[in-house]
Amino acid sequence: MTHRPRFAPLFAAIALALPGLALAQATPADEDHEHAQAKTLDTIEVTASPLRNAIDNLARPVSVLAGEELDARRAGTLGETLERQSGVQSSYFGAGVGRPIIRGQDGARVQVLSSGSSSLDVSTVSADHAVTIEPFLADQIEVLKGPATLLYGSGAIGGAVNVVDGRIPTAQVGKTVSGRAEIRHGSAADENVGMARLDADAGALTLHVDAFRRNSGDYRIPGFAFSPALVAEELAEGEELEHFARGKLPNSALSTMGGGLGASWFGESAWFGASAGTYRTNYGIPPGAHAHEEEGGEPMEEEEPEIVRLDMRQDRFEFRGGLRGVGPLQEINYRVTRSLYEHTEFEGDAVGTVFENIGTEARVEAVQEEFNGWRGAVGLQYGHRDFAAIGDEAFVPPSVSRDVGLFVLQERDFGDFKLELGARHDRVSVDPATGATVDRNATSLAVGGLWHFSETMHLSLNLDRAERAPTAEELFSDGPHIATQSFEIGDAGLDVETSTSAELGLHLHQGRFEGKVSVYRSSYGDYIYLTDTGAEEDGLPVRAWVQGDATFTGWEVEGRVDLVENATGLWQLSLFADAVDAKLDDGGRLPRIAPARVGADLNWSLDGWRARIGAVRVADQDEVAELESPTEGHTRIDAGLAYHWDVGAAGWEAFFEGRNLTNQDIRVHTSYLKDFAPLPGRNVAVGVRVAF
């Protein structure tokens, strides 16, 4: 068994030492800088909540990726874009798939949103299904850590990620036209990316248009596609070394494109907007993920592994609007989203399985005028999903899911203390084509407190009791699920999953320093998970959806300090670390839990130049579930360089980004493909972006 470094004592010491360092550095001359920094923090508004609070005035744990940092982190998948945020890691199923994992929770427990509305794709049905949201179009990305069920229902019991794209303008541009565009080329997969966006005011109308395209070939890897352990196993069984893929990951090429049109009309007391967009992608599944057997469980005799590709399309239509000053209400906002989704899994030239999903979501939020110091909102949300899987690998029967939720949020300041309260109730119904309808109720309650006990520090405490209704996949699966190399069996008798959570956080911003420390614990009753039964069916291990009590505990540390600002430029050091431990109360471990990490970035800026170099150390993961293999740790080094210049009203930027510069063989423990597909090797990307 490999040794896993323990980072908690180290970062507890850092968490205690850095505030002291910052306080020691603060001088009277720092006061203006401190004031400016606090003012900047207040401008970061979290749009995921109807109350739209500033990020520094929320008891709930939220992080926002925007501006230059978002430009530096953008990647082909949402998970990869967010993976340097504390508490957030990425799933991985080839270059086309990377869903965010928040504090060890993923899949049906993490809601992915586009400007506050569900993505309405089928990325929670299977690990090889992509999220239909393009990170290169994002204005900002908001990560709600911990239960976000109050706002978005039981599918957000582990958190939510909201990608704000501005496709429906919520305010006028303020000038005739604005926009941005970017082109880049990456070396690891000969990747080419282009995107463009325009927003324009035309009287009371504001118009929006965007488009993007990304193409890449099979990406380069440092060594073998198979892990060393799997290579050794295959060699022992008589396979020859030259038959293993090496240097490039087969069938990892992808092509993605899309775009949208939007417009909003703004009146004195009302506004209305609409948009239409499309997202299309075609990506491959690395060999080994979709292995097949003949009848009787004997391996198929093939010289080459079967090539499986997914061709996906989503057409999305949205309507949003609002009214202001309606009686005792400050505003009423509404939105309706309709999605037509289909993807086809091709096995060679033959159609394997077709997934179809017609989704509708409607939401109304009423924000009250302040009453006796109380601010708040009440909302009603309705969701409808008509899902079908057609083909030999259709392990889930067609079903219609409905969800009706009612929620209320309230907050009030008591001097330096802010109290946040919330409650939500959902009625979830899943009606399969075969079998009886399953109805479940889910109720969630939350209380949070934010105490500004000094001008530079605040303490937050959050207590949640959240419930999640089981999904159609967990209830009715019955067949081979090739993506996860298992024969899955659901259970229509699954009960509601209940989480009781507590989190304590400390936030400091003093002069040149800003830092956060948080610890949390979530106890789950009737936690739903997939377990090995020890049996086999169709040559695949049988895994059943079962329930058991489980506990997640973890901590996060992040900080940034301005080291020096002089003639050589501004030098900043950023640090982060996180860890989560997940186990069943009966003593077993849960599978695919993200390992502990520690990372640091050194940032420099001077005039139009800025640069960064950073490293992330991911620990070994040897605390694994039964029949799960451990994963070795790794250190990844990234760097970036950019130069900004202005031409008239346009700001131009040329940039260089390097990822995995030491060409490490990186296996992602959260991935089903860790033994078949490493992350890309050294990648150098160059490009130009412009904003006006």
Image (cartoon, helix red, strand yellow):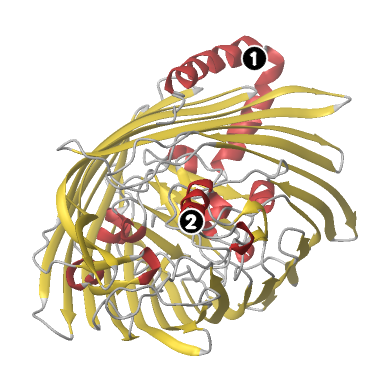
Split into 4 quadrants, where in the image is the C terminus? bottom right
Q: Nearer the viewer, residue 113 or 89?
A: 89
- Furthest-bottom residue in this view: 350
* The label number, if any, that marks residue 70 in the structure image: none
Label 2 sits on a secondary structure element that is helix
Q: Locate residue 167: give its quadrant.
A: bottom right
- Furthest-right residue in this view: 647
Label 1 sits on a secondary structure element that is loop
Q: Nearer the viewer, residue 253 or 13?
A: 253
Q: Nearer the viewer, residue 86 or 322?
A: 86
Q: CA distance from mark 2 to mark 1?
A: 60 Å
Instruction: Indicate left or right for 379 with 614 as reference.
Output: left
The residue that appears at 64% across and 54% down in the rendered structure is: 680
Q: Disc 2 marks which residue? A: 234
Instruction: Indicate left or right for 466 with 213 as reference.
Output: left
The residue that appears at 35% across and 28% down in the rendered structure is: 415
Split into 4 quadrants, where in the image is the N terminus? top left
Please state the horizontal and vertical placement of residue 482, each as a whole percent of the image: 37, 71
* Residue 334 versus residue 7 in the image, above or below: below
Please state the horizontal and vertical placement of residue 41, each as a whole percent of the image: 57, 38
Please state the horizontal and vertical placement of residue 630, each as a whole percent of the image: 41, 41
Which circle, 2 or 1, is nearer the viewer?
2
The residue that appears at 37% across and 41% down in the rendered structure is: 60
Please state the horizontal and vertical placement of residue 691, each as a whole percent of the image: 77, 61
Q: Amino acid at mark 2?
A: Glu
Q: Amino acid at mark 1?
A: Ala
Tell me, yes or no, if residue 462 can be seen here: no
Q: How many marks?
A: 2
Q: Disc 1 marks which residue? A: 26
